[in-house]
Image (tube, helix red, strand yellow):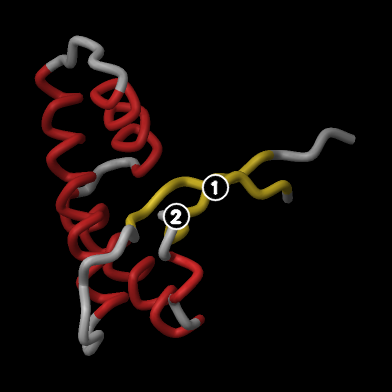
Amino acid sequence: MQKSEQMNICMSGSDSVLLSDSERAAGVLAALNVFQRHGVDVSRCAMAEAKRAADGLLTADEALWCIIWDDAQTAAWRAATIGWLSRDVDIGIALASTAS
């Protein structure tokens, strides 16, 4: 039997290890809310963002998905670091694979 692979949003970046479990959960939830509000597939946004990061030529839809990814990343960062004295940290979102 073959295992299916599922992609989940996770907090990423070199400083993400500083996040508590509740901060991490708040960040992921904030990002999910952005994707849900826009009614877009998270994996399409992640693929468009990866294409943009590699300087690929984007379609109009991909450009919109990149903007939504940026919005989700900002929402996650703000939710995860609320109350921190310093916000000069490397924290963002990524998709992580989990086998189910």
Element class at badge 2? strand
Q: Position of residue 33 (x, y in %)?
A: 25, 64
Q: Which residue is rendered at x = 51% and y = 53% of the image? A: 8
Q: Is residue 41 left or right of residue 88?
A: right
* Badge 1 vs badge 2, beta-carbon distance below 8 Å: yes
**Disc on the earlier residue, 1 or 2:** 2
Res 27 quadrant in image: bottom left
Q: Position of residue 14 (x, y in %)?
A: 44, 57
Q: Which residue is rendered at x = 20% and y = 25% of the image? A: 62
- Measure how far apart labels 1 and 2 are at the Cα level: 6 Å
Q: Which residue is rendered at x = 29% and y = 65% of the image? A: 89
Q: Which mark is residue 62?
A: none
Packing grade of label 1 (10 A; few <14, some 14-19, many >=20) is few
Q: Which of the pair 54/42 is nearer the observer?
A: 54
Q: Which mark is residue 9?
A: 2
Q: Residue furthest right?
A: 1
**Residue topped by disc 1:** 96
Q: Which of the pair 12/6 is nearer the observer?
A: 12
Position of residue 80 relative to residue 34, above or below, is: below
Position of residue 50 relative to residue 56, above or below, is: below
Q: Is residue 72 left or right of residue 19?
A: left
Q: Which of the pair 59/13 is nearer the observer?
A: 13
Q: Amino acid at mark 2?
A: Ile
Q: Amino acid at mark 1?
A: Ala
Position of residue 19 relative to residue 32, above or below, is: below
